[in-house]
Every structure is written in C-alpha cells, then in structure tokens.
Image (cartoon, grey):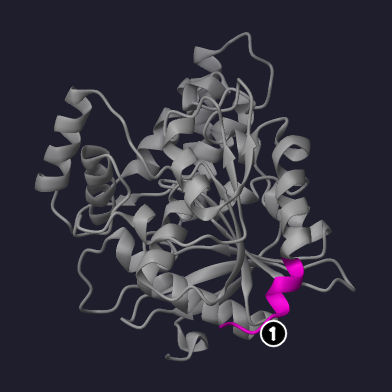
Amino acid sequence: MPDARALPDLRRVNPLPAGADALRALGDSALAMTWRVLQPADRTPFLRADQPPLTRVRYRADDGWGADLFHLPPIPGASAEPVVLAHGLGGSHRDFALEAGRGLAQALRRAGFSVYLLEHRGDPCAVAPADSAGFTVDDIATRDVPAALDRVVEHSGYPRVLWVGHGLGAQVYCLARALGDERRFAAVSLVAPAVRFSSPASTLRSAGLVAALLPRGWVLPTRRLQQLLTPWVSAGADVASPDTQAALARGRLRHGSADVHAGVVRQVARWVAEGALTDATGRLDVLTALRPALSQVIIPSEDPACPPGAAEPLAAALGSEVVRLPAGWGHLDPLLGEHAGPEVHARIVDFCNRARRLAALPAG
C-alpha cells in the first residue's frame, strides 16, 4: 500500500479563497438572522457546536483515493485500544463529536480508547486521483475501509480494531465483511443498521428510477441544502430526531453535513427498490454472506431510515446483543440526543470495554 503520509496537505491542494472566513461568518450571520425572524420568541442559541481538537491521520486506498481519519487520543495512561467511528449518509465525523464536552467520541476517550473518526472518498476531505470517476458504497467498503484499518493498526500499534457504525457506517461494515477481509475487525457496534427495506409502491418506483437514471459521477449539493434549511429547524423532530435539542440539530446541519455522491445514492436507491442491502451489482444479498460476530445492534424505535424491522434480521444473522430504544428515539438521537449519553453512549462504551481485549489478538 502506498505510504499514507505521502498524501498532500489538503490546505494546499484545495486552499480556501481569500476572504473565505469572512464570507463564512457573513453566511452564519445571515442564517442566524433568518432564524430570529422565523422564531422571534425563541431565546435559545441558534447553534450548538464546538468540536474538540482533533488531529488528522491520513490514509490512501489502493486505487489512489486519499482521505482522513480524525484522531481523538485517549486520556493519559490509558491502554488506548483503537475504536473507529463511521458516520451515516449525508453526515460527517462531527456526528460523533459535535460539542467539546459531550459525544460518543469523548465518552470512548474517557474510557481509555484511542478514537478514530472515519472519513472516506465520499467526504469533503477526500483527495481523488487524476483519473477518478464515480464510485459506489462497495468502493468505500472494499477500498477505503481496508486502507483506513491498516492505517489505524499502524498508528495505534494494535492488530485489530473495534468499529462503531451509524446508518451508512453500519452498512459499510456489512459490505466490507461480505465482500472483503474481516480479519481487522475485533468487534462491532452498529446503530440503525438497515438491511431490509419496506416502502410504498410509489417510493419503490421512484427509487428504481433514481437507481437507473442518476448519472454516477454527479455530486448532489446536500451539504449546502442542509445548511440553507437550518433556520427552519425549530425542533429535533424536524430532522426526524425528537430527542435532539433544536440548537444542536441546527449545529449539525450547519457544521456536520456533507454532499452525497450520485454513485452512493444510486446504490442506496437500489436497496430501497429491491428491499435488501446488496452489493453494487444487486446480485449479492449481503445478509446471506455474513457470519456471526461479536456485535451489538442498537435499534431506534422511531427512525424512518431504519425502523425496527429493517435492523432485526441483521441482529439475528450476527448473533448480536440487541439494544432496543423506546418510543421517542429517531435517527440522530443515539448520537446527539439529550439522553444519548446514559442510554446509548454508556452502552456502547460498556460493550467496547467487554471487547477491548480482542483488539490485542492477532488478525486471522
């Protein structure tokens, strides 16, 4: 594998134009003013977002794509087993560390883990090779994930890693195990991991058209759209996350969203149209290719992206420890909700504590 440290400095590859900081501040002010006009009686902050200091650990996939792992080191004197956190569709590494004082990444750090927040070729930090074209979720799972795990092993000194995936980050794990090498995974905690899909006929028809017609190389400007919608979010329920406070939901839209590449959207649309998590060709039902693993599956009760029936089959296939969250839990709530700390983060930390010794075992 090419030396990941040879990746160029992203600030030099894609430098910000002169005055970008001033324009960003002006944009934030405009969004805040719009929100105040829409919600004149609301005295809560417009945004809550204060990411802890992170360092970049670069990696490069075997086809030339490069991206970052954002590293949150463990507390001094800790055993520092590596945990990789993988975000969902349209999100970013900030979903796990949006505020300096709280978040799953900080909870794992306090427990003595070395935390790596994964970004991949679908994220803003990625550097594409000169001959790059469109890509699919399979490419993330079979190229980015192995390269990232090799880099974590090199950086941490442990031969295996613990993996926590939310939404697409959980589905990427399933594809990586079904299509590639599973030896680097010690144990996994999967949050809202949909593998079965049931939708109205109209949705299925629309998903089929998207899968067939959307050009693979397009990039959909979902980051900008989410940012522009920020002033209209008056409650967490507006983003299908009723336990998440409005200011934090707005902070996530402003600072934690990302564009979505068409090849990824096409594959997700195919899953919806066919009713199952499959590879990019649609020939492999991923669930049938998975073997039992030391795993935890967390199922929000009111997640439109992953209702209970979408995740239960995966828990059965993996033989997972299952955490079923009660009424009132939506898609982002297990990460950002007001009750996420004691109800979800603590359970993930407990699971990782019970599995941490496996990180020291040889991959094989």
Near-viewer residue (300 or 77): 300
Name the amino acid, label 1: Gly
In x, y percent, where is residue 301? 55, 27
> Which image quadrant: the N terminus?
bottom left
Q: Which residue is mark 1?
A: 157
Residue at 25% x, 51% y is 267
Q: Secondary structure at mark 1?
A: loop
- Tell me if 94 is positioned left or right of 38 in this view: right
In x, y percent, where is residue 198? 31, 31
Q: With respect to residue 44, does 251 lie above or below?
A: below
Residue at 55% x, 32% y is 250
In x, y percent, where is residue 346? 77, 45
Q: Could you classify mark 1 by the number of other residues whose Cα lies within 10 Å: few (under 14), some (14-19), or many (20 or more)?
A: some
Near-viewer residue (325 or 49): 325
Q: With respect to residue 199, does 175 lie above or below?
A: below
Q: Which residues are magenta?
A: 356-364
